Amino acid sequence: MMTGYRNILWLLPVALLLSWPIWGGAFTRALSPRGGMAPSIAAPQKTTAVAGFSMDGVSFSQLKNGVRDWQIQAKQLYSGEDQDRMQLVTVEAQVFKNAERRFVITGKEGEYNSKKKILTMRNGVNVQAEKGFLIQSDSISYDDQARKITTLAPVQITGKDMDIHGKGMVYDMQKDAYDVSGRVKVDIQ
């Protein structure tokens, strides 16, 4: 038989551990919070602070040498943590050259990068050109600094008595030239 305080001392934790199923339930119930605490106080939820803003019915434009260069109208504009990237909903962008409207670009979604001066439109994009061409694609980018409209997605260009299909397009406003890439199909009526 074991004698002495040293031998009895290690039996106490073993006895408590083995008897936990008997007294453990009552002990944990006694320690649980009571009094109808609100769930938000009992377990605070993590919230992430998103820096940004949101506006409805937005119209903004850029002037170069006192002449309107482009104008964007959106049903809604919002930003996230990157303040240089503005997200746009239901967008119409007008591009001008020498105060004359050259293009009207419409789409359901868009993003304007104010640092790079690039407007990217997505989701059913139409570009109506001043010469009567209609350009349709899933996404189109307008680079204000390079003065180019580009897409890597499949594109359809419809004009007077012609229909052009391709995968990718670059329109250079300086040269007034279209470059359609991929497997190009041209239908002349």
Image (spheres, rainbow, N blue to C red):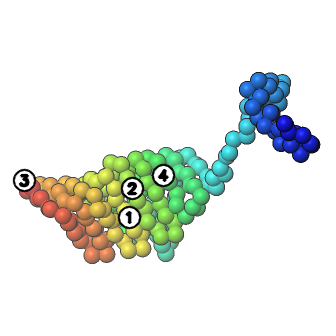
Q: Amino acid at mark 1?
A: Tyr
Q: Amino acid at mark 2?
A: Met
Q: How far is mark 2 from mark 3, CA to CA?
A: 30 Å
Q: Which residue is mark 2?
A: 121
Q: Residues within 10 Å of mark 3 (few under 14, many from 20)?
A: few
Q: Which residue is mark 1?
A: 142
Q: Position of residue 43 (x, y in %)?
A: 73, 37
Q: Which residue is mark 4?
A: 88
Q: Residues within 10 Å of mark 2 (few under 14, many from 20)?
A: many
Camera-nearest label, 2 or 3: 2
Q: Which residue is mark 3?
A: 189
Q: How far is mark 4 from mark 1, CA to CA?
A: 14 Å
Image point (15%, 55%), residue name = 163
Lower position in the chain sequence, tag 2 or tag 3:
2
Q: Position of residue 29 (x, y in %)?
A: 79, 25
Instruction: Give yes or no for contact between labels 2 and 3 (Cβ–Cβ under 8 Å).
Output: no
Instruction: Give yes or no for contact between labels 2 and 1 (Cβ–Cβ under 8 Å).
Output: yes
